[in-house]
Amino acid sequence: MPFPERPSPQKKIWAYSLPSALLLMAPFDILASLAMDIYLPVVPLMPEALGTSPSVIQLTLSLYMITLGLGQIAFGPISDRIGRRPVLLGGGLLFAAASIMLAGTSSATAFIVLRIMQAMGASAVLVATFATVRDVYAQRPEGTVIYGLFSAMLAFVPALGPIAGALIARGFGWRAIFVTLCILAIAATLFAWLRWRETRPRNGSGPRPAFGPILRSFAFWTYTIGFAAAMGTFFVFFSTAPRVLIDRAGFTQVGFSLAFATAALVMIATTRFARPFIARWGNVGSLARGMAMLLLGASMLAIGQVLAVPSFATFVLPMWVMAVGIVLAGSVTANGALEAFGDVAGTAVALYFCAQSLIVGIAGTFFVILLGGDTAWPLAGYATVLAAVTLGALRRLQNQQQVAS
């Protein structure tokens, strides 16, 4: 008599409901983003406190973003060899330790080094989190929901982070911001230590995986560029919105914060209601429609820039359209990019996020410098070019798949 099929280790040990899984994973996704911008309101105060120049403090913002992307190249393969859980717990502890030391330092050099350490911890937890999502939910509809919610959270955190940082600093001083990050990281890591189960496939303990097969995959690059188009659109919006809305449109700081937050609310609402459509359209259809929404929003921005003065209607409303596209694309790009690399998901996730970070950082900064950070042109230009490149790559990918079949 044949024996019953043994359940996979992932299904056996990761039996959480979707809300429980999100409660476990989301804090790490939020912390990695929160640490990037929560101390923006106190940046003007820190040069004097650390005995350095404003340019050095500004450098810590850029170094955090760069390290966040590049650090995943190291932690991805490590998570494939030793597992997601130890990488996650180690990254959480490193993030917490760096945060509390940042709160106590009075040296600019030490502050820079500790910010790099903090970003390394954030890189580790992001790799472990997204590799776990890939391990458990790659062939399940919950995967698109999780990716979509993560994209929405990464947009909403920059809207609330600076406000939270300003309130904390006003009540307790700027160092309390980093104490807060430490406390939140310890709480998330302790919860993960109690609940996070290993999901790395059993055959993931073999030889160290090579980057070559992943980097040669046209599907990987198509969906990674699509993810860069989506998230980079929000990055450029984040970079230009203060100058457009406050300096040129005359918004107050509170009014700006509320207007800025509406884009994130649209993303969250889209995530809530788009699930059946994403399931119907699949990876290709959802990504194509997401890029179409970016192009539509970019066209609206260009028309508003030419025919009207900067306002909520000409700058924020087009971003609502683009926010829908960001969610549609961000919900499927990870699955599309990583679909063929289940056995080395940690490495593939690392390359996915690293490549996306570099594309966004380089191309986004280029458009802001080239087209002027106080206009809508950088946002319209970035979204148009990256969306067009993605659609062209997606068409080529479909042709390759048809020939192969």
Image (spheres, rainbow, N blue to C red):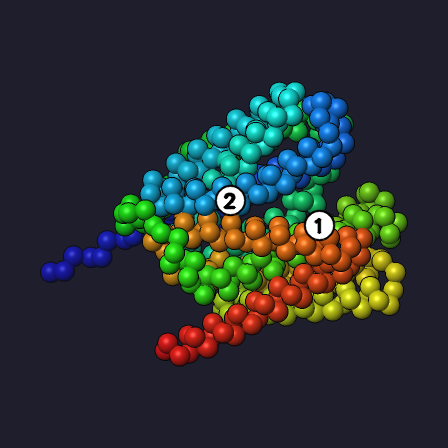
Residue type, mark 1 in image? Phe
Image depth: mark 1 or mark 2 in front: 2
Q: Is residue 374 above or below residue 321?
A: above
Label 1 residue SS: helix
Q: Quadrant of the N terminus?
A: bottom left
Query: Label 2, on which residue?
Result: 70
> Which quarter of the picture shows residue 308?
bottom right
Residue depicted at 74% across the width and 69% down the height = 299
Q: Is residue 155 above or below residue 121?
A: below
Q: Which mark is residue 238?
A: 1
Residue depicted at 49% across the width and 30% down the height = 94
**Which one is in front, 170 or 214?**
214
Residue 114 at x, y percent in the picture? 57, 29
Q: Is residue 369 above or below residue 107?
A: below
Residue 252 at x, y percent in the picture? 85, 44
Residue depicted at 57% across the width and 51% down the height = 358
Q: CA distance from mark 1 to mark 2?
A: 22 Å
Residue type, mark 2 in image? Leu
Residue depicted at 42% across the width and 78% down the height = 402
Q: Is residue 16 visible?
A: no
Position of residue 61 in the picture relative to residue 393 (left or right): right
